[in-house]
Image (spheres, rainbow, N blue to C red):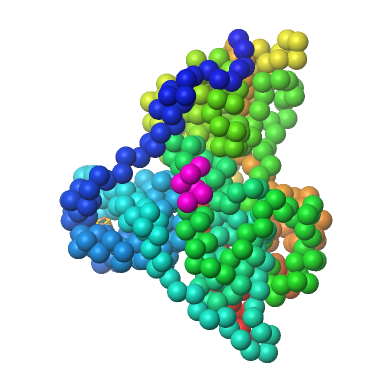
């Protein structure tokens, strides 16, 4: 049972990882869906969007063929509106709130419509926002440093740039986009799309990204504080949570973050995958790892989750993708031990669980029954969540809760002039939440810099 790369032909890789969301092929098709919208007053779809995109307004603009106006409506609230239209779990956000659900009819395909306008804006390179002149005053031109070119950092940078602030983003990777570029299945957003989206955001001007610059290694917080008028930390989370079970160091054990990162950076043929793969977890990252393992050519992929389907963190749509891809699922099972021979993974021993009382998350907690079973596998992918950069946060004496940076209602940390937001603060939510956090951070910084 070898773990090996290069299992498929280039054509098979391309077919496996092609865009899962078919776009509209014409304005007529988009208008048919747009015209179904009831343009609700006090629209629930808008309320359920963390960035409060004016959904009825942008859909009406599509219905009247004002695509440029529609894109501007979306980007005014969410500069990553194109990416979010592909990765948002819309079934639990805007589309899940659409009134058509109450009528037991298909909700308006809001994400698909959003994609139509925003992709056209990117393709046509529409410049929809003007950068205000730099605010002058006693302090002269204001300069802000942002750490992290992920959704929070980019969104913060765009709002600041619109207000005439000069922004420098320090990014530890060689590309921008953060989670969008490095942490999501390639069949949802292609690497090329991510690059185009970052370039579109930067096209407003006034934002420079310095790549391969890691906080705590290549740059320090005190240096940034000295050189800039304010600092925003959008460093995200990144360290994979360990299972703390025997056998975790065996060859063939990896974590989903690393696995997905490799797929995004090395190219499909270069990434090794086993014949029989177990994926531990049931969040979006677990699903992305499982489906991509299958699409890389694994013969059997099994998702192992310690609770039942009712408590799963992923959405039904994501679970359907895994099932359609042929991934198996074992509910009420927790990894107990990984066994190997000659240093390589051979088996995963799991505990059989049952549901007990609700825990802090409100979901019924998994309780070990004492029974076990064994899966023959040659690869184990851990997707049990991510933990914050606790060491880094503590190194700079930032107030934190288990590594999550603590901010006040003005997005400010305990260090004067240093703000923070996104996953680094909340521990990891959706891309759209990070975009909103970036907007909030920018507004707080503007207030702080105001003469
Ligand atoms: Fe349109 Fe549905 Fe939103 Fe109403 S809830 S405005 S029908 S998308």
Q: In this view, does 18 lie to the left or right of 262?
A: left
Residue found 27% across the figure and 46% down from its top? 24
> x and y percent of residue 310 in the render?
44, 35
Residue found 64% across the figure and 35% down from its top? 258
Residue found 53% across the figure and 29% down from its top? 268
Q: Nearer the viewer, residue 443 or 162?
A: 162
Q: Which of 232 and 286 is in front in this view?
A: 232
The picture quadrant where one finds residue 135 is bottom right
Residue found 66% across the figure and 28% down from its top? 254
Mark count: 0
Q: Where is 291 relative to 25, above or below?
A: above
> x and y percent of residue 232 in the render?
65, 65
Is residue 41 visible to us here? yes
Ligand 1 occupies quarter: bottom left
Is residue 354 visible to us here? no
Q: Is residue 348 magenta?
A: no
């Amino acid at each position: 049972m070898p773990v090996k790369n290069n299992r498929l032909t280039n054509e098979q890789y391309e077919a496996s990882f092609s865009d899962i969301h078919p776009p509209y092929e014409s304005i007529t098709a988009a208008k048919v869906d747009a015209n179904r919208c009831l343009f609700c007053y006090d629209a629930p779809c808008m309320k359920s969007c963390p960035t409060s995109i004016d959904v009825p307004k942008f859909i009406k603009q599509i219905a009247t063929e004002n695509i440029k106006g529609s894109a501007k409506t979306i980007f005014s609230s969410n500069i990553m509106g194109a990416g979010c239209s592909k990765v948002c779990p819309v079934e639990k956000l805007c589309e899940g709130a659409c009134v058509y659900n109450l009528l037991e009819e298909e909700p308006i395909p809001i994400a698909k419509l959003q994609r139509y306008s925003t992709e056209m804006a990117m393709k046509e390179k529409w410049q929809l926002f003007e950068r205000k002149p730099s605010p002058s005053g006693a302090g002269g031109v204001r300069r802000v440093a942002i750490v992290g070119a992920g959704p929070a950092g980019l969104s913060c940078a765009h709002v600041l740039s619109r207000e005439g602030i000069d922004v420098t983003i320090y990014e530890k990777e060689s590309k921008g986009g953060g989670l969008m570029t490095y942490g999501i299945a390639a069949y949802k957003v292609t690497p090329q799309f991510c690059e185009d989206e970052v370039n579109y955001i930067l096209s407003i001007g006034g934002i420079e990204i310095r790549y391969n610059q890691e906080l705590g290694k290549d740059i320090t917080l005190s240096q940034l504080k000295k050189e800039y008028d304010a600092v925003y930390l959008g460093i995200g989370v990144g360290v994979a949570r360990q299972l703390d079970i025997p056998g975790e160091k065996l060859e063939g054990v990896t974590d989903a973050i690393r696995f997905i990162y490799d797929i995004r950076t090395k190219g499909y043929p270069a990434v090794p995958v086993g014949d029989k793969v177990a994926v531990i977890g049931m969040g979006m990252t677990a699903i992305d790892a499982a489906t991509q393992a299958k699409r890389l050519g694994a013969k059997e992929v099994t998702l192992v989750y310690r609770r039942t389907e009712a408590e799963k963190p992923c959405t039904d749509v994501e679970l359907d993708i895994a099932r359609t891809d042929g991934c198996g699922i074992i509910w009420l099972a927790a990894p107990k031990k990984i066994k190997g021979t000659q240093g390589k993974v051979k088996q995963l021993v799991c505990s059989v669980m049952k549901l007990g009382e609700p825990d802090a998350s409100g979901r019924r907690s998994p309780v070990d029954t004492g029974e076990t079973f064994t899966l023959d596998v040659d690869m184990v992918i851990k997707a049990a969540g991510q933990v914050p950069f606790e060491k880094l946060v503590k190194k700079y004496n930032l107030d934190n809760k288990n590594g999550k940076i603590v901010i006040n209602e003005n997005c400010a940390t305990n260090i004067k002039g240093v703000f923070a937001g996104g996953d680094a603060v909340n521990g990891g939510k959706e891309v759209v939440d990070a975009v909103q956090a970036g907007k909030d951070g920018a507004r707080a910084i503007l207030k702080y810099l105001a003469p």
